[in-house]
């Protein structure tokens, strides 16, 4: 059960960031690092900013078509300066700080490969099936049981009627 690629996929699907793998350890980013939440927020904010920029440029274009007496070059230059600087700030900061700015503040965790294999073996033994399958999730509901088909005999008769009814063929039109 030493399938490292499968284990890496399981860890990444669980939301953990795998930094590296060697023969005896998995190197993971600390899952409690709050800086990644800020990074996610800034990525969404950047997308909203891009939509806002598009709306401003669209409005500027419509006002120019309607006959606004503005300096086109100056307006376009101002938009490019403001939103170009905001768009380039993230990559510039990453370049200045030498790599992943948000990841630099997160510590690294070493997890022994033997421990991961032990947990996967225990999971497979407990479920009695191969570890390749989905996890077993039991859902219990303590609410009242609702009869889906109130008149089961009428439903069975309707199904039998539909199964035994022959559908006439449509006439051929030439």
Image (cartoon, rainbow, N blue to C red):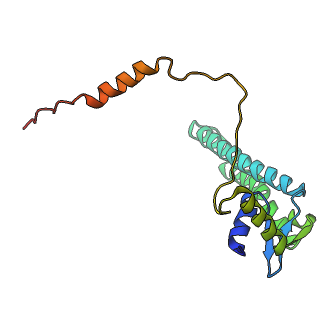
Q: Nearer the viewer, residue 96 or 63?
A: 96
Residue 15: percent from the left, percent from the top? 77, 57
Residue 108, compared with residue 69, is above or below; it is below
Q: Nearer the viewer, residue 60 or 102?
A: 102
The image quadrant of residue 105 is bottom right
Q: Residue at x 73, y 62 (%)?
A: 125
Question: What residue sits 71% from the left and 73% below the top?
Answer: 1
Image coordinates for residue 67, horizontal then vertical, percent: 59, 37
Residue at 64% across, 63% down: 132
Report if residue 142 is visible in the image: yes
Q: Nearer the viewer, residue 165 or 35?
A: 165
Q: How many marks?
A: 0
Q: Which residue does the image show at 68% across and 22% down from the upper left?
A: 144
**Can you name the residue that lies furthest to the bottom here?**
23
Q: Is residue 97 left or right of residue 158?
A: right
Quadrant (top left, top right, bottom left, bottom right) of the C terminus: top left
Does residue 26 show up? no
Q: Quadrant of residue 19?
A: bottom right
Q: Is residue 156 left or right of residue 105?
A: left
- In the rendered image, the vertical position of residue 76 relative to residue 68, given as above or below: below
Percent from the top left, x then y, of residue 149?
A: 50, 22
Determine whether 56 is above or below 107 in the image.
above
Where does residue 150 sit, x and y in percent of width and height? 51, 17
What residue occupies the far left of the structure in this picture? 174
């Amino acid at each position: 059960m030493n399938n490292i690629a499968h284990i890496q996929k399981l860890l990444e699907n669980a939301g953990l960031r795998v930094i590296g793998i060697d023969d005896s350890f998995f190197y993971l980013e600390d899952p409690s690092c709050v800086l990644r939440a800020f990074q996610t927020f800034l990525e969404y904010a950047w997308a909203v900013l891009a939509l806002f920029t598009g709306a401003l440029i669209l409005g500027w274009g419509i006002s120019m078509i309607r006959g606004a007496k503005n300096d086109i070059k100056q307006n376009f230059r101002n938009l490019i300066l403001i939103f170009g600087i905001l768009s380039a700030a993230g990559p510039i900061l990453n370049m200045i700080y030498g790599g992943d700015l948000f990841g630099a503040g997160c510590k690294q965790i070493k997890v022994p490969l033997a421990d991961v294999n032990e947990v996967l073996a225990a999971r497979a033994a407990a479920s009695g099936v191969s570890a390749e399958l989905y996890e077993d999730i039991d859902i219990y509901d303590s609410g009242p049981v609702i009869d889906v088909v109130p008149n089961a005999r009428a439903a069975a008769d309707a199904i039998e009627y539909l199964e035994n009814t022959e559908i006439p063929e449509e006439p051929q039109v030439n």
